[in-house]
Image (spheres, grey):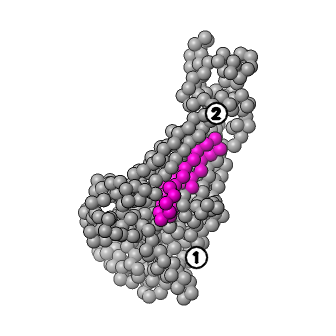
Amino acid sequence: MTDIRELLEQGESATVEFKTSLADNKKIVETIAAMATVGGGLVLVGVRDDGRVLGLRLGEGDQERLVQRVLAHTDPKVYVDLELIDIDSRPVLCIRVPPGDGPHLASGRAYYRSGPATVAMSRDEYERRLLDRLRESSGFERRIDDGLRLTEIDESEVRRFAESARQRGPLPTGGSQDELELLRRLHLVRGDLTTVGGVLLFGRYPQGPFPQSTIRAKAVRGASVDAVAIEGSLFQQIDRAADFVARNLRIRPVLTELVRQDLPELPLSAVREVIANAVAHRDYRSTAPIQLRLDDRGLSVWNPGHFPPPITPALLRQDHPSVPTNPLVARVLYLAGYIEQWGTGTQRVIQAMRDQGNPEPLFEEAKESGIRVILPLPRGLTDRLSLRQQKLLGETKPGSEVRTAEYARQAGVAHRTALQDLRGLEDLGLVTRLGRGKACRWMIL
């Protein structure tokens, strides 16, 4: 509900449209086709153009008739999700539009979204997008072959996904509770075969047929090195990679409104978002794995692929359409809550970094034909440390204990100077004191 209120305050955009009623359902269908073409969106019925909630009176069967009209008048068909919600005791119909796989027609005409407007597509633009769709229709996530049988699918994983996704909203199941029917509705199964996307998302061991579907993760923090190859389903890879980064981050004090909070060096919400985007948008035809590296400068996440037009690194810093490389995979990750509202993930990463006092992230298309996102560690922290203190943190594993005399001997300084260094690190939340007097030790955090 909070997200809906925020959308009402922000107003209409390329991914959000307000309608006062279902009376002009022709325009609604056109808007749905346009949103599916540019990456999905949300239509709120019962709301004025200025965001004021009027409410909606629905008759029996109105929702079902709308769904049938959308299916009858869109090509390729758009399977929308409907949900009736209450805002200030007024009913509003939420129409969630999934991202499509090419230009969608509404009553034989192609449309796209230009800001908050639904615009008829020119013939040249439609033909260009259609060629792109035909080229991508054999995209890797849609590929099937005789080796990808339904036995590859872990039904318990599908059930877990369905239970989690239903807490966020309705699923395109047509009322069925059958896991196989859900996969068909998500275009992950055809006949008795599953697509590449189905195996990547719900396979018992996706790395069998697709060994490139891995994340190579390495953390180098001073003298400490942690390296793993992360496998499993795409859900498991995101969870395990986020956990890997979290365990290799140090805790630092952050002052917000004169209140000290002990937080990781990077906001974990931003870390998870960047990893989920890499998994959703990578080119799975490439034999290269996703590469994740954490060091004392920051986190770098590289994935094989490129920015699809019209996306550029600069555009990621503002409102932009969502153009997923793997729309079927991206939709499932969205339904499960691993990806939030379409086209806003990079902006949430930027804001999370700002809120925690970190430098802004960097987005770049790397020379080696891949996309790299860098989340820098906080500036200014190392500037406040002496070379002795930096060396101590860089060469000592977190959790290790150091005595003042031992540090003084290694650093070649007087006991008083060593004590000042360690107290300074304590003030910054980088070490903690254990014991007093001769029993005093300092644990590296």
Determine the residue positioned at 56% across, 70% down. Answer: 308
Q: Position of residue 304 (x, y in %)?
A: 54, 61
Which sits earlier in the primary sequence, circle 1 or circle 2?
Answer: 1
Quarter of the view holding residue 321: bottom right
Q: Which residue is mark 1?
A: 114
Residue type, numbered disc 1? Ser
Give the left or right position of residue 229, taking residue 398 as reference: left
Q: Position of residue 229 (x, y in %)?
A: 47, 47
**Classed neighbour count for the residue bearing mark 2: other residues with Cα under 10 Å, few (<14), some (14–19), many (≥20):** some
Q: Which residues are magenta?
A: 273-302
Foreground: 342 or 361? 361
Alpha carbon of mark 1 to alpha carbon of mark 2: how far?
A: 50 Å
Foreground: 120 or 443? 443
Q: Which residue is mark 2?
A: 394
**Classed neighbour count for the residue bearing mark 1: other residues with Cα under 10 Å, few (<14), some (14–19), many (≥20):** some
Asked if disc 1 and disc 2 are in contact, CB closer than 8 Å, the reply is no
